[in-house]
Image (spheres, grey):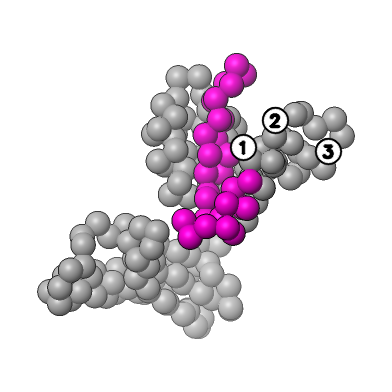
Amino acid sequence: MNKNFILQTEFIAKPRSRIVTSVALDGQIIHKVERTYDSQIENDEDLRLAEAAVATQHQNLAKKMQTSGADFIKQTRSIKISAIDRLALVPGVSSVTDVEEKLNSPNAHAIYAQSKYISDIADAVTLSTKMGPLKIAAMISDQGKFILAKSEGKPFILTLKPDADIRMVLSEAIKE
């Protein structure tokens, strides 16, 4: 295999601590491993443990790439997942709809316009406060339970299954 991969591993502290390793090939990210890091960093020893976790994740992925060779490229090239598909994998979600796409279609249902208003309000709150970006909102109506989520800067409506626990879906969707 005569390809040059770039592996980058970083520790991200906010909004939740996690270790992210990205693999780039030909200038494009082809694979990403993201794991949460639940330990607090309060002293030098905690920092050393976090650094060791970062190094271990980086080394493990590098070893996997070396042993898998060309299979690694084939696997990662076929795994590109869109925002809609990623959100649809959240347990309890029955469908995911791109709000802007629906608003551009003829005879758009009122829920899409209302969702866009909620998204615009969330953007305004984000810009006018120090709370950080608002990413998700829950809506319950006579028609069912919905979640308005933003992914890749676009608003999506997640329609929940009737028996879905909205709290569980929210906690999973926020990770996306």
Q: Residue 72: x percent and y percent?
A: 45, 65
At label 3, which amino acid type do we have? Ser
Crowding at label 1, few (<14), some or many (≥20) Cα neighbours within 10 Å?
many
Asked whether the viewer can see residue 71, the reply is no
Question: Taking 50 as reference, is 115 left or right?
Answer: right
Q: Give me the residue at 45% from left, 19% from top.
A: 163
Q: Secondary structure at mark 1?
A: strand
CB within 8 Å, label 1 to label 2: yes
**To which residue does mark 2 refer?**
111
Q: Residue furthest left?
A: 45
> In this rendering, which labeled residue sits more in front, label 1 or label 2?
2
Q: Residue 127: x percent and y percent?
A: 59, 59
At label 1, which amino acid type do we have? Ile
Distance from disc 3 to disc 1, alpha carbons, whole Å, reads 16 Å
Magenta residues (range) = 121-149
Task: Specify the quadrant of the image occupied by residue 41.
Answer: bottom left
Q: Residue furthest right?
A: 106
Q: Residue furthest front?
A: 128
In the image, residue 58 sits, relative to residue 136, either above or below, namely below
**To which residue does mark 3 refer?**
105
**To which residue does mark 1 refer?**
157
138 in the magenta segment: yes
In the image, residue 68 sits, relative to residue 162, either above or below, namely below
